[in-house]
Structure formats: C-alpha cells, structure tokens
Amino acid sequence: MTIKAVAFDMDGLMFDTEDVYWKSASALLKRRGEIYTPEMCAAIMGRPPQYCFELFKKTFGFAETWQELQQESEDFFLQFLNEGFSTMPGLFELLEHLEKYKIPKGICTSSAERIVSEVLRRKNLEKRFDFVLTAENITQGKPDPEIYLKAADLFGVLPQEMLVLEDSVAGSQAAQNAAAFPVVVLAKHNKNGNFSAARLITHSLNDPKILNLLPPNSNS
C-alpha cells in the first residue's frame, strides 16, 4: 500500500530536546528532595503530561495536583530551552522531500501545546506542517492509538497509508495499534528501547530506507 501521509512525533524525533526534559524533571524533583533516574525517564518517555505527573505523585507522594506539577515542569523546560537545542539529523532534508512531492505531514506529540508551540517557533517550523496534535487534543495518550487515528482522519487517509516516525516505545506501539506504519529513529536517549512494534528502525530521518517508503519510490 502506498504511503500517502507522514506523522511525526516531536521531542527526541524532530528535536534534540530530551536533555531539556531531563533537566526540567530533575529540577522539579530536586526541589522536593528527590532524584530523577533513567528508569523513571524510560517509564514516562512518550507519555502525555497527566500520565507522567500522576506517576510522580504516586511514586513520591507529592501533595500538588498533577496540573500544578506540569505547570512547574514546563516553566523549568522553557527556562532550560534558552540554553539552546538542535534539530535531529536529517529533519530538514526529509521535510524538503515531503514538500517536493506534496506529501502531507503533521505532528502528533504527547507534549503540551505550550511547549510544542514554543519549540516550533524557535526553529521557525510552525507553518511547515498541515496540523499539530498535542496532549490537549487527546483523551488517551500513547500507546493508545487515538492520536494516530485522529491524524489519519485529518489527513483523509487510511491508517495503513500513514507512515509514523517515532522515538519512544509508547509511540511506536501507538502507531502499531493504529495499524499505521511505525518507523523508529534511534539516538542516544532511546538506544536501549524495545521497539518490537516498529516496521523499520534507523538512525536518521533522511535515511534512504525511509525515503524509499515514500513517493515517488513507495511500494510498501
């Protein structure tokens, strides 16, 4: 089946912002005398804010609401974002390919709209996507397929005709659960993940293996 649209995750997939999330979560917990661990990071990677901060509350017994913890964490995130962040390898080359062949593209992220809009603005990418779905647009977060089923509907394609680019286990499972075509891009932050849900695993967004799945070469 020919791929007719591409859905992008954002953090860790389009942008090297996982370190920013690490710093913000570490600052949030340090303020309360707790330590953010790689195990906790893996447990929440790709999940929406409510899941993440309810897990913090359950694990550490924090008195604040999950919304209050989210607000504080986002304040830290935007502060650390000022230190700078880069795009992931191959992003602009892939965007140019999709635009050259008029392949629709959207963003499907578990992050909050406040974070998403600021990250996209700083890289001047707000207008290069057909739509952006954030945590505010869903009721069930990844690995539930809701966000990718909504994306397919917005694209006007079958889920099977949509390629999904992900970097998290939960995200790749969400794409699989939606019956889309999950592709995982590996980097330092996710190299140990169990990506059995992926149809393809690569190391760059402009890997020829990805481009070969897309028009004008697609015969997937």
Image: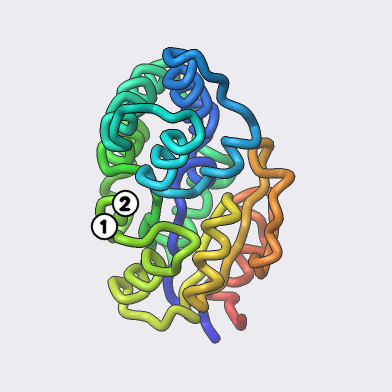
Report the front residue among 148 and 121: 148
Q: How is the image coloured?
A: rainbow
Residue that appears at 55% across and 86% down: 1
Of residue 37 and residue 174, the one placed in the foreground of this image is: 37
Count residues near mark 2 (Cα–Cα under 10 Å), then give few for <14, some for 14-19, many for 20+.
Answer: many
Residue 187 is tagged as none
Residue 215: image location, x then y, percent: 52, 74
Amino acid of disc 1: Asn
Judged from the image, the secondary structure of the residue bearing numbered disc 2 is loop
Q: Reply above or below: 170 against 89.
A: below
Q: Residue furthest bottom?
A: 1
Residue type at mark 2 is Thr
The quarter of the picture where residue 133 lies is bottom left
Q: Quadrant of the C terminus?
A: bottom right
Q: Residue at x 69, y 49 (%)?
A: 193
Query: How many other residues sit within 10 Å of disc 1, few (<14), some (14-19) or many (≥20)?
Result: some
Q: Quadrant of residue 5?
A: bottom left
Secondary structure at numbered mark 1: helix
Q: Position of residue 171 (x, y in %)?
A: 52, 57
Q: CA distance from mark 2 to mark 1?
A: 5 Å
Percent of width and height locating residue 174 = 50, 65
Are the residues at dot 2 and dot 1 in contact (C-beta closer than 8 Å)?
A: yes
- State whether residue 172 appears in this view: yes
| Residue where numbered disc 1 is placed | 137
Task: Please determine whether, in this image, residue 207 is positioned above or below residue 216.
Answer: above
Which residue corresponds to mark 2? 134
Would residue 124 be found to the left or right of residue 11 on screen?
A: left
Q: Viewer-proximal residue, 147 or 212?
A: 147
